[in-house]
Image (cartoon, grey):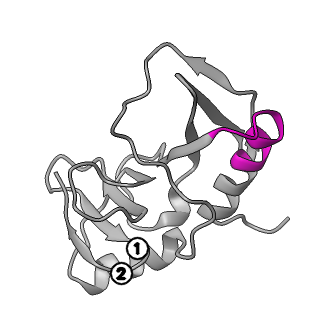
Amino acid sequence: MAILSFNGRVDIAVERLRNRFPDAQLLEAVGKASAGLIDHPSAIDHLHVVFRRGDTMLLVEETGYGEFGNAVELDVEPPKTSATLAWPIEMDLPDADRLKEQFGYSDPYASVSLRVPLGVTWANASFVFGGNTQCPDVVVDTVTGRVFEGR
């Protein structure tokens, strides 16, 4: 069995949910490492994907590597300011990780979110490397390749 990329795993979740709810809009995909702080994206071993469908938010969680359970309705109202992700995107997680390191950000991380960052003037999907309390989050724009510190 081939190892799925981060985007490949997200693609499975998107396809699964949109087969049932074609109008669902992708908000974010969040990958976490059960090992804690990591240095390589291949250690992201859990993924959940969040969608908006009208006034409802839906969550699809990975039950096994690349396998997803049924969508669960979240008991929160979707944020009005959340930008949706146009899917698919060109850049995958290993490419974003390489860019991050090329720009001097080599601290370990425990999570990666793929989303449109809030409070910025552009609206590109970005990988946000985080989960390390000793350093700021690092954001990699999937369109421009721009790398910067997040909040």
Residue 71, image x, y percentages: 69, 27
Q: Which residues are magenta?
A: 13-24
- Label 2 – label 1 distance at C-alpha: 11 Å
| Residue at position x 36%, y 71% in the image | 141
Magenta segment main secondary structure? helix
Amino acid type at circle 1 is Asp
Which mark sits nearer the N-terminus, 2 or 1? 1
Residue 110, image x, y percentages: 37, 50
Q: Which residue is mark 2?
A: 145
Rendered-image quadrant of the N terminus: bottom right
Q: Which residue is mark 1?
A: 97
Q: Is residue 112 visible?
A: yes
| Residue at position x 24%, y 50% in the image | 132
Q: Is residue 19 magenta?
A: yes
Q: Is residue 10 magenta?
A: no
Amino acid type at circle 2 is Gly
| Residue at position x 65%, y 38% in the image | 24
